[in-house]
Image: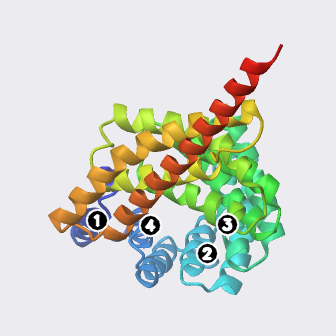
């Protein structure tokens, strides 16, 4: 059952744990594991029932810090935030008091509390909690850990919700690099992070489009990692490649001084490479019937046309620059 959970096969894990529960006397650990699996499957009411049963079997008249954490998560997922938050805060204080050197567990609790605050619309308090989680994860297990990346992503969203967009982009860049460079890279988190950059930060005008250029290097790392791990051959890859190209195009317009034009031209070249990789993957997904991605195919074609137009402008600028140099004494 533990292996199935690690493989993200929670329904199979639930079946196995249910069988364990039938064949053995009631045990708190089994019930907690069932609650955790059902939480992961988004069956939060069932998860809450198992957590409450675990507390009863353990003989706890009052919920212990573990009970508070488990039930708090279930209630948070059920959007019962006013009930969840006191439980989670009490669990956090309990862990700080009983096991003050357990940085990882305390960081996980800060992360959970931050998520609850953010869902309640209390963004500044969420920022404080996610910042603590990021700091504790960083000093205990390092910035390469997925847990560190998760805390950074939570902090990114909380900072956006607080209107602190420059800080949010700093953390977004860090989160993207954490995802881009890890062994278990997956297109979905990359796609979502690119969406935050394009649609939530730069799109509404909170930061200039040139800011997106900071993601050029992390995008290159992500693409190389996906290719290395064979994750560049399906529709998911095509969709994320298109969004990467969209970002590079946004910060790759043919404008500015000579240096800025050169940088923009490099980004457009990279964007073109990604779109030429994305197009066939997206078309194949539509033809197979797996998903209808015709709207994304249309976007790819439009972006290629924009690239052609921008490259033509750049060649015109280059021609003017060469002509001007030729007439200089």
Compute the Cα span from label 1 to label 4.
11 Å
Q: Nearer the viewer, mark 3 or mark 4?
A: 3
Residues tagged 3 and 4 counted as in contact (Cβ below 8 A): no
Compute the Cα span from label 2 to label 3.
29 Å
Which comes sooner in the sequence, label 3 or label 4? 4
Marker disc for residue 180: none
Label 4 belongs to which residue?
36
Label 3 belongs to which residue?
200
Residues tagged 2 and 4 counted as in contact (Cβ below 8 A): no
Compute the Cα span from label 3 to label 1.
41 Å
Q: Is residue 304 left or right of residue 26?
A: right
Circle 3 packing at 10 Å, graded few (<14), some (14-19), many (20+), is some
Query: Residue 316, percent across and down?
Result: 61, 38
Location of the N terminus (image quadrant): bottom left
Location of the C terminus (image quadrant): top right
Marker disc for residue 72: 2
Q: Nearer the viewer, mark 2 or mark 3?
A: 3
Query: Residue 205, percent across and down?
Result: 76, 65
Residues tagged 3 and 1 counted as in contact (Cβ below 8 A): no
Choose between 105 and 216: the one closer to the eye.
216
Compute the Cα span from label 2 to label 1.
22 Å
Label 1 belongs to which residue?
17
Choose between 325 and 70: the one closer to the eye.
325
Choose between 196 and 275: the one closer to the eye.
275
Which comes sooner in the sequence, label 2 or label 1? 1
Circle 4 packing at 10 Å, graded few (<14), some (14-19), many (20+), is many
Q: Residue at horizontal 67%, vertical 43%?
A: 213
Query: Residue 226, percent across and down?
Result: 39, 39
Choose between 287 and 48: the one closer to the eye.
287
Compute the Cα span from label 2 to label 4.
12 Å
């Amino acid at each position: 059952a533990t292996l199935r959970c690690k493989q993200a096969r929670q329904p199979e894990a639930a079946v196995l744990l249910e069988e364990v529960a039938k064949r053995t006397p009631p045990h708190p650990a089994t019930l907690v594991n069932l609650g955790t699996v059902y939480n992961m499957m988004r069956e939060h009411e069932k998860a809450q029932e198992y957590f409450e049963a675990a507390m009863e079997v353990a003989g706890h008249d009052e919920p212990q810090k573990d009970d508070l954490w488990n039930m708090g998560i279930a209630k948070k997922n059920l959007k019962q935030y006013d009930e969840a938050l006191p439980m989670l805060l009490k669990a956090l204080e309990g862990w700080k008091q009983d096991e003050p050197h357990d940085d990882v567990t305390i960081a996980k609790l800060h992360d959970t509390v931050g998520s609850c605050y953010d869902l309640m619309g209390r963004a500044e308090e969420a920022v404080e909690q996610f910042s603590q989680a990021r700091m504790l994860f960083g000093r205990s297990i390092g910035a390469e850990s997925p847990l560190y990346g998760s805390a950074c992503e939570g902090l990114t969203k909380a900072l956006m919700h607080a209107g602190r967009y420059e800080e949010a982009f700093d953390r977004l860049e860090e989160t993207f690099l954490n995802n881009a460079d890890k062994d278990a890279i997956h297109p979905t988190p990359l796609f979502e992070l690119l969406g935050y950059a394009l649609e939530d930060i730069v799109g509404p005008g909170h930061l200039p489009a040139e800011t997106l250029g900071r993601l050029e290097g992390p995008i290159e790392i992500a693409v190389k990692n996906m290719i290395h791990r064979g994750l560049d051959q399906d529709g998911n890859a095509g969709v994320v490649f298109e969004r990467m190209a969209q970002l590079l195009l946004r910060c790759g317009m043919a404008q500015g001084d000579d240096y800025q034009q050169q940088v923009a031209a490099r980004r457009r070249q990279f964007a073109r490479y990604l779109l030429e990789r994305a197009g066939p993957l997206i078309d194949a997904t539509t033809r197979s019937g797996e998903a209808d991605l015709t709207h994304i195919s249309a976007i790819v074609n439009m972006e290629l046309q924009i690239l052609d137009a921008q490259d033509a402008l750049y060649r015109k600028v280059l021609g003017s620059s060469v002509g001007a140099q030729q007439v200089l004494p």
